[in-house]
Every structure is written in C-alpha cells, then in structure tokens.
Amino acid sequence: MNLTFFIVDDTRVKLEPLEDDPNSDYINACYITVSYRLMSLYYHIPGPIEVNLEEFIRMIWDVDASKIVMLTNLFENAIEKCKQYWPNIGKTQQYGQINMKLIKEEVYAHFTIREIQITKNSNSRIFRQYHYTSWPDKGVPSDIASLVEFRNKVNKSSSKRPGPMIVHCSAGIGRTGTYLALDYLIQQAQAENSVDIFSCVSQMRQERVNMVQTVVSSEIYMENMRKII
C-alpha cells in the first residue's frame, strides 16, 4: 500500500529552483526543530525512490548537510523501500549537475557508516551517512541497546559541514519520528530523570503530520528505551 503524507508549508524544505524551471523548489521533506533545551534542526524525508532521487541529492547539496541518518534497508520483505542513492565503493554516480562518490564504508553488526563526497561545479564536500540496518518497518529493533549506541555515535561525530542532519526511513514518519523522539527523550531523561513522550511527539506532529506512525510499536519501543536510560 502506498501512503502519501502532506507536509506543512511553513516547515517544508525549499530547494534552489533549477534555471529552466522556477517551480522546481519542491521536495517532500520538512525540518523538525524539536529538541531538548538546545535548538536542533533536522531535515527529514521519506527514503528516495526513482521519481525523486535527483531532488534528494539536490537537497543534500542545497542545505549543505552535515550528516545523513538512514533508518531503512533498501529492501524489506522483498519490497523495495529506498533506492541506493550512493554508488559502490570507488565508483561515481551523476545526478544532474552533482556527482557523488563513495570514499569509505565501515560495516558493523547493526549499522554501516559511509563517507561520501559530492561535487558540483568543481566544488567538493564530504559528509558521513549513518545507516542503521536492524530496524524492521512498522516494528521494533531486535536490539534496542544497539539503536541507542548508534544514536550516541551519530551525535558524538564531528562534521566540517555547517548544515543540518538529514534523517530518513522509508515513509519518513514512523522510524524517523521515533528516532528523533529518542534523541530528545534521552537528553530529557539525563537532565530530569523522567521523560514526557506525549509532549515530545505532539511537538513533532505540529511540524510533520503523523510523526511516529505505529502506535503499538512506538509504545513498546519507548517502554524499552526507559529501561536503558
């Protein structure tokens, strides 16, 4: 079943229009500013598919992304969830005016870290993609502690890029929303020794409709998270 979710215009990401198309500023992505105490800016988006692959790469360049967090696998239950937008190691892939090259790839038990170079008009940038691979769609990670470890590694990593972090799964609301809630709630728990899940999710839904898509899996996940933090 294909699901379509509309974004709030005030929070949507606006691409730099192409020279020959002034209406080419749209992409189904929005920014989320919910954070505990310190303002954090995330751009989150459904996983790219064939029809919006070039727009996704343009967004990475336009916002000067500091890092990308990917929470879906390319295929799940024999269904394609996301296009592989990065090339294989040492290869280069072209998207319009932008070239992308995979420089390095580190594979761990529950996640993979990729170092990617993008180039436009002879200007190059390097960012890291953090790909969590153990989270089933509409389900709960088999090892919750590994997701917390993954989140900590993402947050502790430095970046030379000034832009926001891009977070995506497949639909752009379930796993992405839960990951952003985890980031917020861990900070809140460390400071207050308590968490307010309802308030956190409510704030995110003001900026993106239907964030944290599956109620049952989210409740199970959050209960496990409480035990860890």
Image (tube, rainbow, N blue to C red):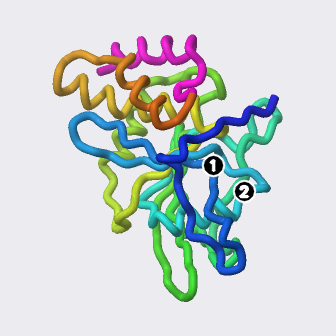
Badge 2: residue crowd in 10 Å (few <14, some 14–19, many ≥20): some
- Measure how far apart labels 1 and 2 are at the Cα level: 9 Å
Task: Identify which residue, 217 or 210, lies in the foreground.
Answer: 210
Q: Is residue 60 left or right of residue 163?
A: right
Whether tag 1 and tag 2 are in contact, CB under 8 A, the answer is: yes
Q: Position of residue 87 (x, y in %)?
A: 68, 65
Outermost bottom residue: 122
Q: Residue type at mark 2: give it.
A: Asn
Q: Position of residue 208 (x, y in %)?
A: 52, 36
Quadrant of the snapshot with the C terminus: top left
Magenta portion: prevailing SS class: helix
Residue drawn at the location 38% of the way across and 35% of the way down: 149
Q: Position of residue 30 (x, y in %)?
A: 52, 47
Task: Identify which residue, 68 or 2, lies in the foreground.
Answer: 2
Q: Is residue 41 left or right of residue 213?
A: left
Residue drawn at the location 35% of the way across and 20% of the way down: 199
Tell me: residue 15, above or below residue 182. below
Circle 1 is placed at which residue position? 28
Task: Identify which residue, 196 or 28, lies in the foreground.
Answer: 28
Quadrant of the snapshot with the N terminus: top right
Circle 2 is placed at which residue position? 52
In the rendered image, residue 215 lying in the magenta stretch gets the answer yes
Residue drawn at the location 39% of the way across and 38% of the way down: 151
Give the magenta-colored segment's residue range: 210-229
